[in-house]
Image (cartoon, coloured by chain):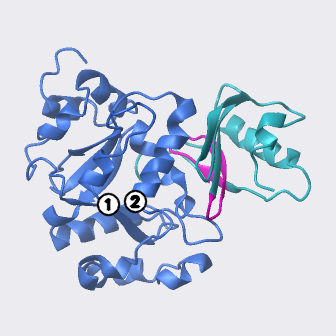
Chain colours: A blue, B cyan
Amino acid sequence: MAGLGSCADLNLATQDQEDRVGQFADAKPGCACEQDTLSEYSPGIVEDNETILRMVCVPMHIHSKKPELKSSFFSHIASFGASVQRLEKSTDEELTACVEGLVSGAEDRVWLGYVQASARAIRDVQVGKEGKQSFCVADAALENNRAHAEIHCAYRIPEADRIEYRVQLMNVFKGKTVLNRRSVRDGAIWNALGAELKTRALPPQWADLA
Amino acid sequence: MGANWDGEGAKAPVISTLRAASNFVCLLPTGMEMPEPMLHASGHAGLSWSSDDFYGELEFLENGYAAYYFSRGQERHKGVFAMEVDSIPAAITALLPT
């Protein structure tokens, strides 16, 4: 990606590319783009004390018998980047639109809940490489969602090591205890959803999180 | 199931990896705990086992290999192994939950 000077340029050039994360790692190693804004819509760089949310909306990402996530929930950390929301920077409307956008794309999707972690906790993870940050949390604001951010692997990792990275991220986000969808903003996001999205059936193992 | 099944640009399932996962399950010794199937954004099939102090996962790759990661307490095992049609390598069987 020679010639792409800024993180914003890199963001635009790689938006639909499967190797987006690898290109960021090559062109801006050491999570350099955490210190830069990636978009003209950005509310600023992601600070360590921000709360990072990832919505759970795809049944393929949950265990078939237990109310837990599978590590596949974080598969995108090595390709396009895993989309997340910056809680403190999100308006209620942006959070609602985020859920609606994810769920309305297919009839089998349903808002199952969410997981959260601080940006600091995500950045503190060190897998394998002694003393080296494994995950970047970077601003990736969109025109219609200024609080959008992404989690990337900080460097290229071989396929053989990807499971361990996903599992470590699952631990940070406490993937065994998905949070109730009604608890975001004290129910404001749930209440704002349309009736069709609220009445989508939950899988039986999710009954306690209704 | 086609591409973008997760709404975030996932690839369509890679059939060869689904077959490899299915074959692996068929080769599990009788009585062994059945794994949870999974599908990654790469289109690769996977299998996992989880309990309070144990986690195991396999990801079936397109080159006939599978990546593995197992943790039990402080123990960690990871790497890749060549998939065989008629058997599971003994070193992998030894890591599976009983």
Q: Residue at x 32, y 45 (%)?
A: A151
- Residue type at numbered disc 2: Phe
- Label 1 Cα crowd, 10 Å radius (few <14 / some 14-19 / many 20+): some
| Residue B46 visible at all | yes
Tell me: residue B21, above or below residue A196.
Answer: above
**Along the line of sight, the residue nearer the viewer: B96 or B4:** B96
The residue that label 2 is drawn on is A173
**Quadrant assignment for the C terminus of chain B:** bottom right
Residue B45 appears in which quarter of the rendering?
top right
- Residue type at numbered disc 1: Ala
Tell me: residue B23, above or below residue A14.
Answer: below
Q: Residue at x 10, y 49 (%)?
A: A42
| Residue B6 visible at all | no
- Label 2 Cα crowd, 10 Å radius (few <14 / some 14-19 / many 20+): many
User: What chain letter is assigned to the residue under label 1?
Assistant: A
Residue A93, image x, y percentages: 18, 71
Boundaries of the magenta span: B37-53
Helix, strand or loop status at disc 1? strand
Q: Residue furthest top?
A: A2
Mark 2 to mark 1 CA distance (whole Å): 5 Å
User: What chain letter is assigned to the residue under label 2?
Assistant: A
Residue B18, image x, y percentages: 70, 43
Helix, strand or loop status at disc 2? loop
Count the marks: 2
The residue that label 1 is drawn on is A117
Q: Residue at x 39, y 32 (%)?
A: A130
Residue B5, image x, y percentages: 50, 52
**Along the line of sight, the residue nearer the viewer: A129 or A9:** A129
Whether residue A16 appears in magenta in the rendering, the answer is no
Whether residue B44 appears in magenta in the rendering, the answer is yes
Residue A189, image x, y percentages: 27, 78
